[in-house]
Amino acid sequence: MKEDRAFFARLAIVVLSCLSAACQAAQVRYVPVTEEPMLATASQATLFLLGDGGENNEPRRDVLVHLAENISSVAADGSGPPVMVAFLGDNIYDDGVRAEFVNEDVEKLRGQIYALGRFPNVKGVFVPGNHDWANGRSDEKGLAAMLRQRDGIERLAEGRDVRLLPADGCPGPVSQPLGDAAHLVFFDSEWLLREPDDHCGTPEDFYRRLREELEANSDRHVIVLSHHPLVTGGPHGGNVAPFEHGPLVYYLSSLAGVSIQDRGSAAYSSMARRLEDAFAASGAPPLIQAAGHDHNLQVIGLSQAGAADYQLVSGSASRRSNVRRIDGTRYASDGFGYMRLDFDGTAVRLQIYAREAGGGPVRTVFTCALASRDGSTACQEASLAGVDE
């Protein structure tokens, strides 16, 4: 009996400790920029990155209003440079487009699509995410949900140039030029995690096509876009705490890589390794791998041979999660927001827009140059304001 009381006393101490700040996932804090920077030269093309916007809530409305105003200013009533808006997956929470709730679920796309406006020089691309693939259900149900989303996008487009890519339930890659400034390569990373036995060929076929796509565009800035990041300091990269998402078992499962949606799982690790091998084998790794999945905003410089120069995570259009500083982090935020890339003859320039988790206006919080004409990179880490742990 004494031993039982002692055990429960120790357990109570652990639980109480985990309810304190010491048991919360780490959150790095950076000093935001104080002024919106002026671009040195006119942009030749603009790419917006916005992910995980599938929940219709107040933060998403703020983000989409700001995005729409930003797009309009760049599009210049159709006379401006080409603009692409990439929606980086989990476009409809929680289970994609369900067969019994098609109209209700597709309606979650309306705000994202309408933010594009009606400009002839603006295009939109939705990338499939794991929630769009019916959130862990069978391959058959996942594919059906994703294809219903494709049809819903086409129905809501109303003359806008917006689509789901890849559109056929296969992994891609699917390329889209962004004027003469950049080359975008979209692929379905959820397909790669699942590796379904379907009409799309084998994963080896995909990795070969990706390598060939990079080789063929070695003289351009290439941006590779998918839902899942290869590197992240967010929860899917292990930045979790006991009881943060429910019972202790969820914390232990995350650390053990039980879910294929976590970077530590065997399936995810294999996918990341094979993508990086394809990048390296091409002899022309991309400038950026852009993704969502973790509900935060991250800029990570990558130094390993064969990797992309930068990992961008833009997954906080409608949900947020903590993020820690990892090797290569240049900036990270748990705010709701999105990213903008401008391409000109001298550089690729990044701006991040976000609002605080508790409210406030969407504003510029970080900016830097990711590449210059001579191939050097100039993106420096923002000034640290502290770490919440």
Image: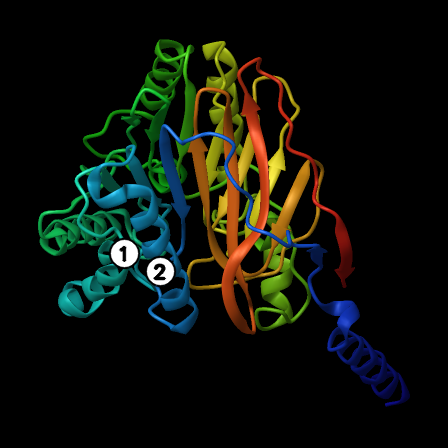
Q: Relative to 374, is 144 above or below?
A: below
Name the amino acid type tagged 1: Ala
Q: Relative to 286, is 197 above or below?
A: below
x and y percent of residue 12 in the render?
79, 83
Q: Nearer the viewer, residue 308 or 251?
A: 308
Q: Nearer the viewer, residue 134 or 179?
A: 179
- Left/right placement of residue 333 relative to residue 168 reads right
Q: Relative to 128, is 67 above or below?
A: below
x and y percent of residue 265 in the render?
55, 43
Name the amino acid type tagged 2: Leu
Q: Residue at x 36, y 28 (%)?
A: 44
Of the numbered discs 1 and 2, the one sitting upstream in the chain is 2
Disc 1 + disc 2, Cβ < 8 Å: yes
Q: Residue at x 57, y 72 (%)?
A: 246
Locate residue 380: give its quadrant.
top right
The label shown at residue 64 is 2
- Left/right placement of residue 276 relative to residue 135 reads right
Q: Relative to 4, is 21 above or below?
A: above
x and y percent of residue 51 in the render?
40, 51
